[in-house]
């Protein structure tokens, strides 16, 4: 790895706090000594922030309490000094209404933590869904050298010898329970077996997708994202990341040198080849735009047509989980199969190019990481649809749904809220067939609020008992990356912002044609104009606080759901005026 020094010790950012012979610096030095530190702990020594998203309520980050010590060890070994800074832990399963409401809060917290403290570089500890984009967004805007430490996937789940995958098998067995095919005792045993270790979800859900994207963008050490959380290699990766960030400070290897359009293209390529979570679209657009790269939904649609899905990992793939993916060679191995699509000259945190970091990587299991000649899906990781229901676009995973829905017409069954849908879903008299399109609206960025993962609407119990396991569903919500089925998501503009989805009525015919990338309702423009005169926006969820601010500034899904005032158009990150 490159360790060339291009920065002098007295030009370290932290020296602005510690070096001057004045009263302010006296305060900083004396208070550091109050914590038992010596001048040698800060003099000519990079101060490295470790932003840790550990908490007592985040099972995906349980091990961060220990891993942070390994990162500290690495930083000290390389001549830096660690400063742990806790941040929002955003536990996906516990935070209501959705962690997505707080992704931007974490991003702002990271940017401000780094801006306001005497640190020269940062190690970002994340993995549970929104923590990865939240940390990266903040670090990109702060502009200090940054390296990402992924939490790593948990071990495979197990129930009576059956392999269980995060999320996917919860939905699957819940349908079986509603159909009366498994007992309550079975269900309780599944609860105890589906999450067997610390680490993030081990399907190719949002967490695995986002950490893979982060590695593909060059922000982690090579191979970091695939290592299971419970594997000793994960401990070594943490220490190595700590060592590497110190060199990155001396090399002034800042995120703007790494997150270039080449890096972003590489991330999209890898996302497509892994059969990524639909959430990746939103987060990637936001991250790219923070880096000044104007990414749109069309970039994903085009990539989806070009790049085959070769990671045979659930939910897009069959059978396998992240632990299998790691044993098959992990992300580096997958990228060796994509060299014709990747921009191999992109710089990584190692100081080497992506191409250099792939040297020596190989695939050990062609069934888990398929060759391009035998993909899981030729194309179709994601498709972007447009039409009079979603003029600014919406997304679907064609590969994850029953092919009969690729070209389908059916009547809408519209719910205005999650509560309304939930109250109706078990009703045996519900007027619904397998050809209906179930619609949930007012659950977008503004309406949700925060765009919860409600887009995989449950199949009505009446239909589940008839054996129906997939049907078309449409919403302005997101869905979990571990979900599957014919779910059209992220409809933009959302209903709560006055998008045409708000004008749809139960019984209207909806057409979907994935090959033509079209989604429309059979309602005339005149009738839509008439309905608009009758439409009133839903009452805002918040009248004060963060939620109120969120509603004033959140952008739509096709624009990455960032706050308008955080994008690069608002100017460079704020520094620390010398006067302080
Ligand atoms: Fe944390 Fe799935 S709940 S990654």
Image: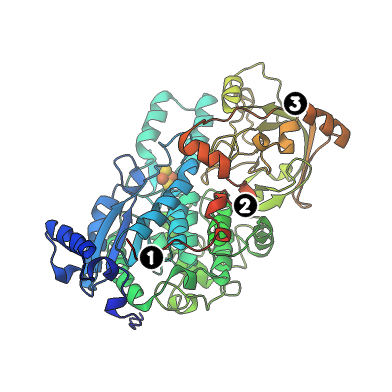
Q: Mark 3 points at which residue?
A: 506
Say which of marks 2 and 1 sits in front: 2
Disc 2 to disc 1, C-alpha distance? 26 Å
**Quarter-of-image position of residue 302:** bottom right
Q: Is mark 2 on a helix, strand or loop?
A: helix
Q: Is residue 224 above or below residue 172?
A: below
- Residue at left 69%, top 58%? 298
* Residue 110 locus on image (x, y percent): 39, 54
Q: Is mark 1 on a helix, strand or loop?
A: strand
Q: Tell whether 92 sits left or right of 385.
A: left
Q: Tell whether 297 sits left or right of 333.
A: right
Q: Tell whether 327 sits left or right of 18.
A: right
- Residue at left 45%, top 48%? 129
* Residue 116 locus on image (x, y percent): 34, 57
Disc 2 to disc 3, C-alpha distance? 29 Å
Q: In which quarter of the image is the C terminus?
A: bottom left
Q: How crowded is mark 3: few (under 14 residues within 10 Å), some or many (20 or more)?
A: some
**Marked residue nearer the N-terminal end (1 or 3):** 1
> Ligand 1 falls in which quarter?
top left
Q: Quadrant of the N terminus?
A: bottom left
Mark number, residue 559? 2
- Residue at left 40%, top 36%? 94
- Is residue 164 visible in the rendered image? The answer is no
Q: Which of 564 and 218 is in front in this view?
A: 564
**Marked residue nearer the N-terminal end (2 or 3):** 3
Q: Nearer the viewer, residue 10 or 273?
A: 10
Q: Which of 419 and 543 is in front in this view?
A: 543
Q: In this view, does 330 lie above or below 108?
A: below
* Residue 53 locus on image (x, y percent): 34, 50
């Amino acid at each position: 790895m490159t360790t060339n020094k291009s920065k002098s010790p007295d030009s370290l950012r932290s020296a602005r706090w510690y070096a001057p012979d004045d009263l302010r610096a006296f305060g900083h030095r004396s208070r550091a000594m109050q914590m038992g530190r010596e001048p040698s702990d800060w003099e000519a020594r990079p101060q490295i922030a470790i932003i840790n998203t550990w908490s007592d309520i985040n099972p995906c980050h349980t091990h961060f309490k220990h891993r942070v010590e390994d990162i500290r060890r690495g930083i000290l070994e390389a001549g830096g000094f660690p400063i742990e800074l806790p941040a929002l832990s955003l536990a996906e399963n516990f935070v209501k209404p959705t962690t997505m409401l707080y992704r931007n809060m974490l991003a702002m917290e990271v940017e401000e933590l780094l801006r306001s403290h005497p640190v020269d570089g940062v190690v970002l500890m994340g993995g549970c869904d929104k923590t990865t984009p939240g940390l990266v967004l903040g670090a990109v805007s702060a502009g200090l050298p940054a390296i990402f430490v992924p939490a790593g996937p948990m071990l495979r789940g197990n129930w009576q010898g059956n392999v269980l995958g995060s999320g996917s098998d919860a939905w699957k067995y819940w349908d079986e329970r509603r159909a009366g095919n498994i007992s309550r005792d079975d269900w309780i045993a599944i609860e105890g077996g589906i999450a067997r270790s610390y680490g993030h979800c081990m399907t190719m859900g949002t967490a695995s997708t986002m950490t893979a994207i982060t590695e593909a963008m060059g922000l982690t050490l090579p191979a970091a994202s695939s290592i299971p959380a419970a594997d000793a290699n994960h401990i070594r990766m943490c220490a190595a990341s700590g060592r590497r960030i110190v060199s990155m400070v001396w090399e002034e290897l800042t995120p703007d040198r790494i997150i270039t359009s080449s890096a972003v293209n590489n991330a999209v390529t890898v996302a497509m080849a892994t059969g990524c979570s639909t959430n990746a679209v939103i987060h990637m657009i936001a991250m790219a735009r923070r880096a000044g790269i104007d990414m749109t939904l069309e970039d994903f649609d085009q990539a989806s047509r070009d790049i085959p899905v070769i990671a045979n990992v659930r939910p897009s793939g069959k059978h396998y989980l992240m632990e299998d993916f790691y044993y098959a060679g992990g992300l580096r191995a997958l990228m060796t199969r994509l060299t014709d699509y990747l921009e191999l000259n992109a710089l990584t945190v190692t100081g080497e190019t992506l191409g250099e970091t792939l040297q020596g990587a190989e695939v050990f299991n062609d069934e888990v990481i398929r060759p391009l000649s035998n993909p899981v899906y030729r194309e179709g990781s994601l498709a972007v649809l447009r039409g009079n229901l979603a003029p600014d676009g919406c997304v679907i995973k064609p590969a994850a749904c029953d092919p009969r829905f690729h070209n389908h017409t059916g009547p809408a069954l519209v719910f205005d809220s999650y509560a309304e849908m939930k109250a109706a879903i078990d009703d045996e008299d519900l007027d619904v067939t397998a050809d209906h399109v179930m619609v949930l609206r007012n659950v977008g960025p503004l309406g949700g609020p925060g765009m919860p993962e409600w887009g995989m609407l449950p199949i009505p119990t009446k239909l589940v008992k008839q054996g129906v396991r997939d049907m078309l569903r449409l919403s302005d919500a997101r869905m979990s990356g571990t979900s599957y089925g014919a779910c059209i998501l992220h409809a933009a503009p959302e209903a709560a912002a006055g998008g045409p989805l708000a004008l749809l009525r139960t019984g209207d015919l909806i057409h979907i044609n994935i090959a033509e990338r079209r989604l429309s309702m059979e309602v005339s423009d005149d009738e839509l104009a008439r309905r608009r005169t009758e439409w009133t926006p839903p009452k805002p969820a918040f009248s004060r606080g963060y939620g109120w601010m969120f509603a004033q500034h959140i952008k739509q899904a096709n624009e990455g759901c960032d706050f308008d005032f955080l994008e690069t158009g608002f100017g460079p990150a704020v520094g620390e005026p010398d006067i302080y």
